[in-house]
Amino acid sequence: MIAVVDYGVGNLFSLTASLESLGIEAVVTGDKRKIASADKIILPGVGAFGDAKELLDKSGLTDFLIDEARSGKPFLGICLGMQLLHEESSEYGIHKGLGLIPGKVCSLAGDTRGLKVPAMGWNALKIDRECPLLKYISDGDYVYYVHSYYVPAGEYTAAHSDYGVAVSGVTWNKNVYGTQFHPEKSGVKGLKILQAFEEL
């Protein structure tokens, strides 16, 4: 079973609908006991980094989720949830993340060579290294993004997309994975990524 973490942000309906369409058992919850009993964890998120981190802290889930991830349980962050997995963000000030994947979240503004921000729409994934989350994905497959901040491609990038700059589409550190794009809005390819996560 997958626990989808409910902490007050995130498009939970489309994500759970996608999981259900794949026949994957999932529960939306902020209850530590239910999360602990799940086989895998998904941390969704939309909105501003600082606000989301504050909600996560107030829910009492921050340290708990770090411990769950460090236990080896497969953990996936989506969109803002992916950004929260990293060390810090510069969105409206400096905010500390969960630190599960090395890297910092930066503004797209000024880096996109004239492309509009937020980045919104379909973009091709370029695979940088073999990753279990990408077992059904081919180089050049398109996925759907909506974001104004990004993690620059680097050592922990498994796949990136070009948007005037190399944007980490998938980041990965051991059992912890993040997708800047929305798998639940990325059609068949997005469903394949969720399926691959379930199969970990």
Image: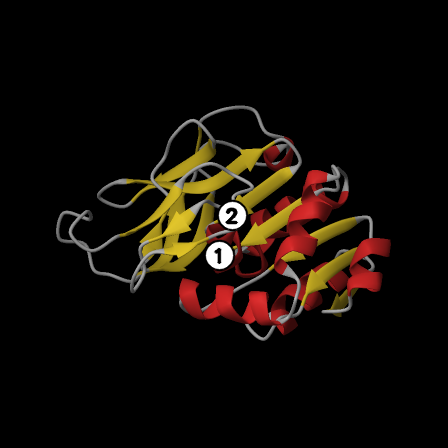
How packed mark 2 is, by other alpha carbons closer than 10 Å (few <14, some 14-19, many 20 or more), is many
Mark 1 vs mark 2: which is more N-terminal?
1
State whether residue 67 appears in this view.
yes
Colouring style:
secondary structure
Quadrant of the rendered structure where residue 200 is?
Answer: top right
Q: Which mark is residue 79?
A: 1
Q: How many labels does the image show?
A: 2
**Residue 54 as seen in the image, left or right of residue 190:** left
**Residue 149 as seen in the image, left or right of residue 98:** left
- Asked which secondary structure carries label 2, the reply is strand
Q: Which residue is drawn at 62% across and 71% down?
A: 7
Residue 4: % across, % down: 70, 62
Marks 1/2: CA–CA distance? 6 Å
> Along the line of sight, which residue is nearer the eye, 19 or 40?
40
Callout 1 touching callout 2 (CB < 8 Å)? yes
Residue 89: % across, % down: 37, 53
Mark 2 highlights which residue? 179
**Residue 156 as seen in the image, left or right of residue 13:** left
- Residue type indicated by callout 1: Cys
